[in-house]
Image: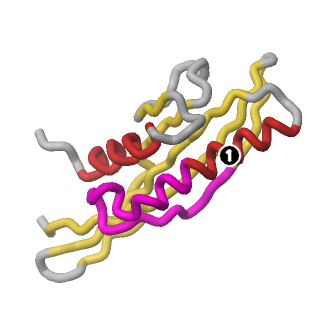
Amino acid sequence: MADSNIDLIVAQISSILTNVSGISKVQSYAPVYLNNLNSATIWWGGITEIRNLSLKAKEVDYQVVVQINVHLSGGVEAQTTLKDVVVAARQALDNKPDLNSTCLYHNITSVENMFVTERGNVYAVGMITLVATKEEALT
């Protein structure tokens, strides 16, 4: 069975993020434990819109969420570390507007950050949400 469009998009995002400084591992599944800190998890967020272009083609907007987990030691450097990694990831994605030819274009629709303290394990989470637009044949 051929990969679906979303699988190809997720694979390209994974490939792009593999080269981002500060991200040691990229995966397309949620970790059971957050022991793989300084990692990125990519998942499909759904389809936000489908537009018929003609009797033969449509545009589909696939939503993808990138969750970046960064281990923190605290203090001012904690916010700087998260900011640096999230900005580097956003810039890497912006430098590939068609995600290596897997879509027509993509737009980053939001970037959200939060800090989590869990039994002394402090980490930050950056969530980058993007929408990748792909042209597909009507079936």
| Residue 5 vs residue 105, the one in the foreground | 105
Residue at horizontal 46%, vertical 42%? 17
Q: Per the image, is 94 magenta?
A: yes
Query: Is 44 left, or right, of 137 in this rendering?
Result: right
Magenta region: 89-112
| Residue 22 vs residue 14, the one in the foreground | 22
Residue at horizontal 31%, vertical 68%? 104
Relative height, residue 37 to residue 94 (above, below): above
Relative height, residue 33 to residue 23 (above, below): above
Residue 76 rendering spot, x and y as whole percentages: 87, 39
Outermost residue, bottom direction?
54
Residue 110 rendering spot, x and y as whole percentages: 60, 60
Query: Is 121 left, or right, of 24 in this rendering?
Result: right
The quarter of the picture where the N terminus appears is: top left
Residue at horizontal 37%, vertical 41%? 15
Q: Residues within 10 Å of mark 1 (few under 14, many from 20)?
A: few
Q: How is the image coloured?
A: secondary structure
Residue 119 rendering spot, x and y as whole percentages: 79, 17
Task: Give the labeled residue for mark 1.
Answer: 84
Amino acid at circle 1? Asp
| Residue 7 vs residue 48, the one in the foreground | 7
Instruction: Determine the image quadrant of residue 109.
Output: bottom right
Residue 11 rendering spot, x and y as whole percentages: 33, 42
Relative height, residue 129 to residue 119 (above, below): below
Relative height, residue 15 to residue 64 (above, below): above
| Residue 98 vs residue 123, the one in the foreground | 98
Q: Per the image, is 91 magenta?
A: yes
Residue at horizontal 55%, vertical 54%? 90
Query: Mark 1 falls on what kind of element?
Result: helix
